[in-house]
Image (cartoon, helix red, strand yellow):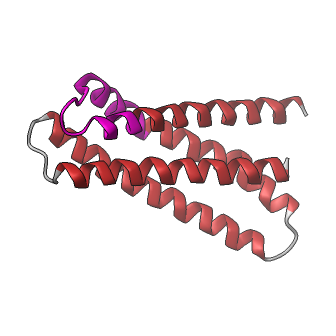
Amino acid sequence: MQQQFSEHHELGQAYRELLSLCDRLETLADSIPRRIDLTSCRVILTELPEKLRRVHALEEMILFPAVEIQRADDGRYALIARLRAEHDQDDRAAVELVRVLKAVLDNRPSLSWDAIGYMLRGFFETVRRHVATERLLLWRHA
């Protein structure tokens, strides 16, 4: 029981850190194109892949087994497959986002400012939805 609490606490902390990063992405999106905080952009580039990988690893270690144990129907496999597919989608989107932000830092953006803003918003809104859904799943299966 203590280990389960500790694992849930660790995942909760990882979610809070990822959501904080989403807040910074939103601030960055709001600043485009006039007031881009280049320092914040660099921090985001550094932290995003690591934080996303950490959350996904913890979910696969904590949430996925909980879903498998609690759901007796065949739907559990479909749910886990969907969650894995969402992780893959998040990872691909993060790689593309990092690529675009690196180009911004190098003062050679490959997309229009509107497109970059939409890309940032699409990413952080999707991540926020995933975190909310996975928190709900964890709460239901804890």
Instruction: Magenta stretch: give its range.
Output: 25-49
Q: Residue furthest bottom?
A: 74
The residue positioned 33% from the left and 38% from the top of the image is 30
Q: Is residue 127 above or below residue 15?
A: below
Examine the structure image and report whether residue 27 is included in the region drawn in magenta. yes
Foreground: 108 or 81? 108
Q: How many marks?
A: 0
* Residue 54: % across, % down: 54, 38
Q: Specify the quadrant of the image occupied by residue 106.
A: top left
Q: Specify the quadrant of the image occupied by residue 80.
A: bottom right
* Residue 83: % across, % down: 61, 61
* Residue 67: % across, % down: 78, 58
Q: Is residue 46 above or below residue 136?
A: above
Q: Is residue 48 above or below residue 82?
A: above
The residue positioned 85% from the left and 59% from the top of the image is 69
The residue positioned 31% from the left and 26% from the top of the image is 40
Indicate left or right for 87 with 41 as reference: right
**Principal SS element in the magenta part?**
helix
Q: Specify the quadrant of the image occupied by residue 101.
A: top left
